[in-house]
Amino acid sequence: MKKHKKRFLGKERGITLIALVITIIVLLILAGVSIAMLTGENGILTQAQNAKNRTEEAQAEEQNILTNYEQYIEGSTNGGTLTTVTGNETTNTKVQDSLGNVITVPAGFKVVNPGDNVEDGIVIEDVSHKETAGSQFVWIPIGEIETNKGKITVNLDRYTFSEDGTKMAQGTNKVVAVGNGSDYCLELESSSNGNITAKDINTFISKTKETKGYYIGRYEARTPEKRTNVTDKLTTVTEKKDDYVYNYITQSQAADLSQNMYSDSNFTSDLINSYAWDTALVFIQEFSVDKDYSRQTSLNDELKEKGTDKDVLCNIYDMASNCGEFSTENCDASGRPCVARGGYFSNDSDLSYYSSSRNGTSKTNPNEKKSFRIILYL
């Protein structure tokens, strides 16, 4: 009996040890699972932080919407929200015209024509940036636009135009340069040909679609000092009507001046690109009396040093006239990598140069017939 009892007791101890080992293993597994659930990529703590971030983002968006409503109400009681911008703002301001179209005004700018609507060409003027104060730009709206005659849509794109002004969207396609069927134009992110491309063309496209518009210089680039030779020193660039046309300049110099005109975290300045040029032409044709303006040749037979009132639609001057204007687009022609847009004086008999034409040109041959235009985007 004693021997049997000892065997039974020994067996009972064996079962207890195995159970203990199994229990420890299970606890370790549970502990590992619990830690993973708490700290893993989809863990409770991570999900909690994500939820917190989403809540904060939603609150910020809600506050932004409320601020916009407040601006709209305030502006409506003062004769239209465009009147509420003074140029003393330190951040960009969203306002509306009388038809409800949203315009974002850059920090430091005021609206020149608050009684107009987007279709008229909303003009802003630099108030707070010392060297460039007085420079003016025109809002080019993107997307669906409310007008007195109903809704009209303007899409951001690169375009070609037929002789009657009909637009054809080209996107990232190659576009033939006027005057030579073998030269092709593209908007590149970078170029090995010595011409300067846009600061960041993809950012321009995304930001412009997000804010539903961008600004184009109201005039060809200007400078306070008259230029008479390629050896003249580079001076301050402006967009002021009463300054002199900024000519005798290379494409790389034009790009540098445009890209450095402003150093403001609220918005970006750049040399005009093909998307900005072509879409501005679409805007002009949609909202002016000239439905085939894209094929307009120069209206000047001589250089107008301070511009002209002959070629102005939707508050934008001389896109067909006075000087050809450098852009950031690239031409694959040998020796002519730069693309100039628009017509220039004395070219009324040459139908190869008109507002929407693309012309391959040298990067090292500045003259009185070449200038440039600046854009702003937010």
Image (tube, rainbow, N blue to C red):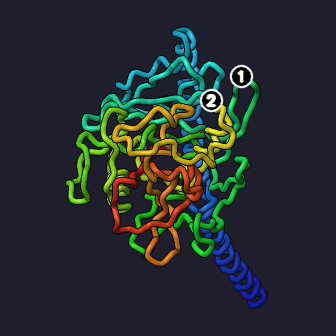
Disc 2 crowd, CA 10 A, few/some/many (<14, 14-19, 20+): many
Quadrant containing the N terminus in the rendered view: bottom right
Whether residue 45 is visible, yes or no, is no
- Contact, CB < 8 Å: mark 1 with mark 2? yes
The residue lying at 41 percent from left, 34 percent from top is 136
- The answer to which of 339 and 151 lies nearer the viewer is 339
Residue 153, percent from left and from top:
71, 39
Residue at point 68% right, 37% down? Answer: 286
Type of amino acid under label 1: Asn
Q: CA distance from mark 1 to mark 2?
A: 9 Å
Where residue 52 appears, x then y in whole percent? 56, 43
Instruction: Compare residues 98 and 271 and report the one nearer the observer.
Output: 271
* Residue bearing the label numbered 2: 119
Q: Position of residue 10 (x, y in %)?
A: 70, 85
Question: In percent of the image, x 70 and y 28: which residue is there?
Answer: 146
Could you tell whether 350 is left or right of 136 in the image?
right
Residue placed under numbered mark 1 in the picture: 148
Q: Is residue 253 left or right of residue 189?
A: left
Q: Earlier in the sequence, mark 1 or mark 2?
A: 2
Question: Residue farthest to the front?
Answer: 349
